[in-house]
Structures are given as structure tokens and as C-alpha cells.
Image: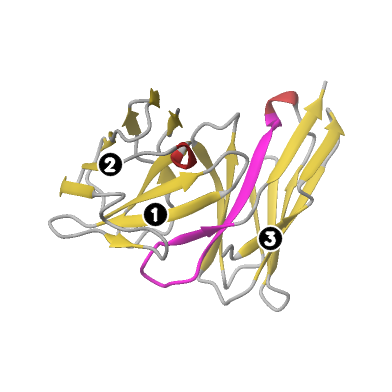
């Protein structure tokens, strides 16, 4: 069963707008990772946030983690058409196993 | 980050046949994994490929259906055996190094079974 649930399942925005997607999970985690997938191809690693961190930034990406609520959010600022993709959160519930459990994903469409 | 390649990138196969997918990494890595992504779905972990020993399979996946090899620290194969249309998916390998949490993915193999 999936550890994470993502919300919304799909998102359509205009270029320049911000996109926010959320991920909820069920058990305690070691870290949470966000990935992007373009058109059913390989996954691109975006950002990793550890359980003792609350917020991380990478370029136009901002990730928050609330372990009390077992949730994370990914914000893409000033979106571009090239940001059109599916975004997945993945949780690592083990300290050394590196086994990831993926959420259902959010399909983002950025219209030019 | 590691550079990962997979072969083939895609294939169309007949039911009842088997396909072996290769995953090659440009540097030695501790952990290698195989995932399946069914059409329109998220990724599900099939197994952890262990160097020099049998792979560790997740619930719902068995060695007879998905035999895995890992002869060294840079290479692994996944075989999809006795295929049926339900095996049509994208199969992805991923890698991680000990002491590093980040996991990197290959470009995937898109398999269609007729």
C-alpha cells in the first residue's frame, strides 16, 4: 500500500503562477524526497528533506515538512512551461535501508 | 550524482516470453533497486538487488517471476518472466550509496506485452 497520498492529483496553472502540492504519509520517516517525472520517463531527484528539518529551498523549489501532521508540501514559484510534469513524494521509513515508498503523484500542467 | 543507463529503453513483447532489463551505473554504488510503474500509476518497489547474494523481494513480488542479478557494484539485471499483458509497465532501476540518503533513478524501460 502507498505510504503517501498526494493532493491534488492534477493541477493546471498559467506560466508565472506558483504551484503547490501536498503529500501526506502514515508512519514515521527518516526522510522525504520529491521527484519529477516527464512524460513517463525516468525520475529526476528534486530535493530531500530529513525528519529533523522543517524547510528547504532549491532554486524555485521550496519544500516544507511537518512531522506532527505527517505531511509535506512542494512549492514551485514562477512556474514555466518546462515544469509540466508529474511530481512524486517518496518516504524513506528506515534509517539505513534506503527503501522508498511513493505517493500517487500530482500531474502539473503549466500553460504558456 | 550517478549516471544510470538502462537497456532496452522500450520493447514490445509477446505473452509467454521473458525480457531481461539491464541497469548500468557509472560508479560503484552500495544499493540498487528495481521499481515498477504501471500505466498511470505511481512507483512500486519490486526488490533490492544485493551484490553477491539473492535479491530481497517486496510483498507481492517473487523471484520466479522477477529474477534479479547483481554481479558487481555497477550492474544489475531484472528479468520479467512468462510475461502477460498485466506486466506492461515502466521498469526503473535506482541507486543509492551507503551513508547517502538520496536515491537516483535510471531513465526506465517501457515494456508493452501483447
- Residue B79: image tag: 2
- In the image, A83 versus A99, the foreground residue is A99
- Residue A43: image tag: none
Q: Which residue lies furthest to the front in this view?
A: B16
Residue mark closest to the camera, 3 vs 2: 2
Q: In this view, does B83 lie to the left or right of A2?
A: left
**Residue stretch in magenta:** A83-102
Residue A97, placed above or below residue A75: below
Distance from Cα at disc 1 to Cα at disc 3: 20 Å
State if disc 2 and disc 3 touch (CB < 8 Å).
no
Distance from Cα at disc 3 to Cα at disc 2: 30 Å
Q: Quadrant of residue B82?
A: top left
- In the image, A84 versus A62, the foreground residue is A84
Horizontal and vertical percent position of residue A58: 62, 45
Horizontal and vertical percent position of residue A74: 71, 51
Q: Residues within 10 Å of mark 1 (few under 14, many from 20)?
A: many
Mark 1, secondary structure of its residue: strand
- Residue A5: image tag: 3
Instruction: Identify the residue position indicated by label 1 in the image.
Output: B46
Distance from Cα at disc 1 to Cα at disc 2: 12 Å
Mark 3, secondary structure of its residue: strand
Residue B20, placed above or below residue A25: above
Q: In this view, does B95 lie to the left or right of B24?
A: right
Looking at the figure, which quarter contains the C terminus of chain A? Answer: top right
Subunit under mark 3? A
Q: Can residue B39 be seen in this view?
A: yes
Q: In this view, does A12 lie to the left or right of B90?
A: right
Horizontal and vertical percent position of residue A33: 55, 55
Which of the two labelled residues, at mark 1 and mark 2, occupies the earlier sequence position? Answer: 1
Residue at x 45%, y 46% (from the top left corner):
B36
Residue at x 37%, y 33% (from the top left corner):
B15
Amino acid at each position: 500500500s502507498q505510504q503517501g497520498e498526494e493532493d491534488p492529483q492534477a493541477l493546471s496553472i498559467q506560466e508565472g503562477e506558483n504551484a503547490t502540492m501536498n503529500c501526506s504519509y502514515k508512519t514515521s520517516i527518516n526522510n522525504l524526497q520529491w521527484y519529477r517525472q516527464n512524460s513517463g520517463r525516468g525520475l529526476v531527484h528534486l530535493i530531500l528533506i530529513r525528519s529533523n528539518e522543517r524547510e528547504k529551498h532549491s532554486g524555485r523549489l521550496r519544500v516544507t515538512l511537518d512531522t506532527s501532521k505527517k505531511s509535506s508540501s512542494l512549492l514551485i514559484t514562477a512556474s514555466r512551461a518546462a515544469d509540466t510534469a508529474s511530481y512524486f513524494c517518496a518516504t524513506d521509513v528506515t534509517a539505513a535501508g534506503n527503501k522508498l515508498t511513493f505517493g500517487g503523484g500530482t500531474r502539473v500542467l503549466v500553460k504558456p | 550524482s550517478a549516471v544510470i543507463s538502462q537497456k532496452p529503453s522500450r520493447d514490445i513483447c509477446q505473452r509467454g516470453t521473458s525480457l531481461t532489463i539491464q541497469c548500468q551505473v557509472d560508479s560503484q554504488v552500495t544499493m540498487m533497486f528495481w521499481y515498477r510503474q504501471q500505466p498511470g500509476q505511481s512507483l512500486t518497489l519490486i526488490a533490492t538487488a544485493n551484490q553477491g547474494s539473492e535479491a530481497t523481494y517486496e510483498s507481492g513480488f517473487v523471484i520466479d517471476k522477477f529474477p534479479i542479478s547483481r554481479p558487481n557494484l555497477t550492474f544489475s539485471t531484472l528479468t520479467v518472466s512468462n510475461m502477460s499483458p498485466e506486466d506492461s509497465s515502466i521498469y526503473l532501476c535506482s541507486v543509492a550509496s551507503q551513508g547517502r540518503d538520496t536515491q537516483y533513478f535510471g531513465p526506465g524501460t517501457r515494456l508493452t506485452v501483447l
